[in-house]
Image (cartoon, helix red, strand yellow):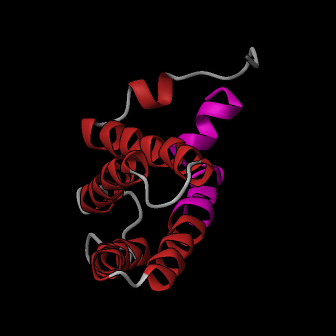
């Protein structure tokens, strides 16, 4: 572990930021597991359901985080949260209907857009994850 790295920023953050971070981390870890599994198996479906729940909780918890305020207490990131909730609905519906190509396309899009790209923004200076890796 980098000696300058500290978990104090997350330990001192509000409970909603701590939960938001925990749900996001769970979704990231589940993503790695799910992508390594054979598709359509019981374990894939079970972990997928947990992933969907984790992503929904990440999106929902964001509405109680208002560090960046542009439109009242909201920011453009909250539009992403709404988008994620809508996409989760369509992805689950596609899987249940057997439209696996659409399900796969939506899920991969959410991994790249909501986890990778949006997650990268949490490492910008001043944000909690940046403070963790930079030592505060």
Which stretch did the figure color magenta?
115-136
Numbered circles on residues, count = 0
Residue 136 in the image: x percent, y percent? Answer: 61, 29
Dividing the picture into quarters, in which one does residue 56 lie? bottom left
Relative to 3, residue 9 above or below: below
Q: Residue at x 65, y 54 (%)?
A: 124
Secondary structure character of the magenta stretch overall: helix
Residue located 56% across and 71% down the image:
108
Quarter of the figure with residue 109? bottom right
Dividing the image into 4 quarters, which one contains the N terminus? top right
Q: Is 122 above or below relative to 78?
A: above
Looking at the picture, how far across and down is residue 15, in whole percent? 26, 35
Question: Magenta includes 124?
Answer: yes
Name the side, left or right, on which 114 lies relative to 47: right
Indicate whether 117 appears above or below 55. Answer: below
Q: Is residue 38 left or right of residue 48?
A: right
Foreground residue among 99 and 5: 99
Residue at 34 percent of width and 43 percent of height: 17
Q: Nearer the viewer, residue 14 or 88?
A: 88
The spot of residue 29 in percent (x, y) is: 53, 41
**Front residue of this view, candidates 50 and 135:** 50
Q: Is residue 131 magenta?
A: yes
């Amino acid at each position: 572990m980098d000696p300058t790295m500290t978990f104090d920023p997350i330990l001192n953050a509000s409970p909603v930021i701590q939960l938001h971070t925990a749900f996001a981390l769970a979704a990231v870890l589940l993503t790695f597991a799910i992508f390594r599994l054979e598709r359509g198996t019981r374990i894939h479906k079970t972990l997928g359901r947990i992933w969907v729940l984790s992503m929904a909780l990440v999106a929902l918890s964001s509405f109680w985080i208002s560090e960046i305020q542009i439109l009242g207490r909201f920011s453009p990131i909250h539009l992403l949260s709404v988008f994620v909730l809508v996409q989760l609905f369509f992805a689950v519906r596609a899987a249940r209907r057997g439209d696996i190509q659409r399900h796969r396309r939506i899920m991969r899009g959410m991994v790249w857009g909501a986890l990778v790209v949006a997650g990268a923004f949490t490492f910008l200076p001043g944000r909690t994850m940046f403070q963790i890796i930079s030592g505060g």
